[in-house]
Image (cartoon, rainbow, N blue to C red):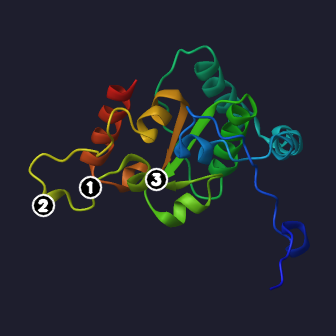
Amino acid sequence: MWRARFENVWLTQPNRVLHHENMATEEMREKNYSLEELKDFLQKNEGKMIPDQKHVFDTILQAILSDQGGMFFLDAPGGTGKNFLINLILAKIQEKGEIALAVASSGIAATLLSGGRTAHSAFKLPLNMTLVDRPTCHIPRQSGTAKLLQKCKLIVWDECTCLIKLHLKLSMNTARHQS
């Protein structure tokens, strides 16, 4: 049987974080990135931001790093660099060793975010809200997902307006109750 090394087939070597008893699979997934690649990405791209992007970048980072928190809506026409800016913010938070969760309302939108996945996957949202009397996100308090939400410094939700209002409300309530 032939075995190929990752680098021989042009795949990046996985980040083999030492398994720690308190680090759930979900947290390991969110921390599975190369610090060198993040620093390289930031070094190459931070200077490319236009003044409006830089203002948003600085404002959001200040709110996160000062533990001030907040909710920000980034609204701009297609092709104006929203995903570029979001990926820079995600990289900056991750560079500091923090957890930044990237979700989107659709799988297509999730592929444009670094480490992105669907909101349904991240928050265990019900798929058909009309079939459930009292819809909830199915995240047990002591689960890996709950611990991930507790440690998360940033949640970016791309195309959040494409979902039902109740999905957003459920996600926000779940995040609040986990912290």
Which residue carries the number 1 mark?
126
Which residue carries the number 2 mark?
131
Which residue carries the number 3 mark?
159
- Identity of the amino acid at label 3? Glu
The crowding category of the residue bearing disc 3, from other C-alpha atoms within 10 Å (few below 14, some 14 to 19, many at least 20), is: some
- Identity of the amino acid at label 1? Pro
Farthest left residue? 133
Q: Are marks 1 and 2 in contact (CB under 8 Å)?
A: yes
Quadrant where the image shows the C terminus? top left
Q: Are marks 2 and 3 in contact (CB under 8 Å)?
A: no
Residue 126 x, y percent position in the rendering = 26, 55
Q: What is the C-alpha distance between the residues marked 1 and 2?
A: 9 Å
Q: Earlier in the sequence, mark 1 or mark 3?
A: 1
Residue located at (48% from left, 23% from top):
70
Residue 43 x, y percent position in the rendering = 88, 39
Residue 170 x, y percent position in the rendering = 28, 41
Q: What is the C-alpha distance between the residues marked 2 and 3?
A: 24 Å
Q: Nearer the viewer, residue 102 or 71?
A: 102
Judge depth for marks 1 and 3 and give the one in front: 1
Residue located at (83% from left, 46% from top):
41
Q: Earlier in the sequence, mark 2 or mark 3?
A: 2
Residue 45 x, y percent position in the rendering = 83, 44
